[in-house]
Image (cartoon, coloured by chain):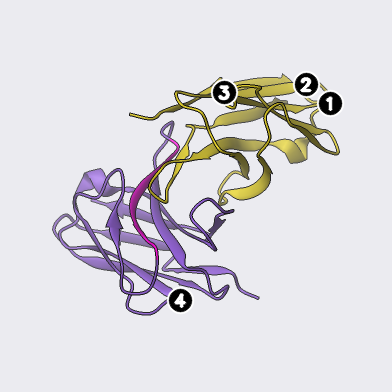
Amino acid sequence: GQQVMQIPQYQHVQEGEDFTTYCNSSTTLSNIQWYKQRPGGHPVFLIQLVKSGEVKKQKRLTFQFGEAKKNSSLHITATQTTDVGTYFCAGPKSNYQLIWGAGTKLIIKP
Amino acid sequence: NAGVTQTPKFRVLKTGQSMTLLCAQDMNHEYMYWYRQDPGMGLRLIHYSVGEGTTAKGEVPDGYNVSRLKKQNFLLGLESAAPSQTSVYFCASSYGPRDIQYFGAGTRLSVL
């Protein structure tokens, strides 16, 4: 069946270092959404990418959608403590659902 | 504007007990979803609804039932709780099937 793989599961960084998470789908996606979940919180929508090769920026966050619309990435430049949390990608399935990646947990080393 | 509200926020059950989780949204969304979240497994869809009076099974529906009698409310029931149902449950809603999903704060359920 359709799968969305997200790597890595965890990433430990020093504050100020960069962070990247990758999302790979087994099928072509019409769009991809990214969400952030703070510790103890709930997923909150960040952005949606629709076009092949699309790149969008939100301050220090850069989102990319692959040319084949089967992969996507989120890159954070110069991480801050406010970036801590788990980042999820999600793509639509055929029957009204989203299929979710397992998430990448960003941990800032003390 | 409250968005998506879940009650209760925490609950402890004994094996075999039943309970109902309530989700209410005030955004006039057609689509509503119940997910469970377990460590390292992301979000798994339990049941969803594409409109008032309709429900459908998701990825992990066994042991759960749902009802959508009113457009703004989506109820998740556990008839006979099992320890494997210990999890965090999230409700979400969206305007359309591929639109942004808005989540409630979650219900943390422990089944002993």
The answer to if B46 sits in the magenta stretch is yes
Which residue in the protein does label 2 denote? A18
The relative height of residue B66 versus residue A12 in the rendered view (above or below) is below
Direction from residue B14 to residue B74 in the image, left or right: right
Q: CA distance from mark 1 to mark 2?
A: 5 Å
Residue neighbourhood size for the residue with mark 1, other residues' Cα within 10 Å, grouped as few (<14), some (14–19), many (≥20): some
The relative height of residue B73 versus residue B104 in the rendered view (above or below) is below
Give x and y (percent) for residue B88: 41, 50
Seen at 83% across and 24% down, the residue is: A16
The relative height of residue A87 versus residue B52 in the rendered view (above or below) is above
Which amino acid type is shown beneath numbered disc 3?
Tyr
Q: Quadrant of residue A15?
A: top right
* Callout 3 secondary element: strand
Which residue in the protein does label 1 denote? A78
Which residue in the protein does label 3 denote? A10
Seen at 65% across and 39% down, the residue is: A50
Which amino acid type is shown beneath numbered disc 1?
Ala
The answer to if B45 sits in the magenta stretch is yes
* Callout 4 secondary element: loop
Marks 1 & 4, CB-CB < 8 Å contact: no
Say which of A88 and A37 sits in front: A88
Give x and y (percent) for residue A73: 66, 25
Give the color of chain A as drawn.
Answer: yellow
Marks 1 & 3, CB-CB < 8 Å contact: no
Which amino acid type is shown beneath numbered disc 4?
Gln
Label 1 vs 2, first from the N-terminus: 2
Which residue in the protein does label 4 denote? B72
Marks 3 & 2, CB-CB < 8 Å contact: no
Which amino acid type is shown beneath numbered disc 2?
Asp
Q: Are marks 3 and 2 on the same chain?
A: yes
Q: CA distance from mark 3 to mark 2?
A: 14 Å
Q: Which residues are magenta?
A: B42-50
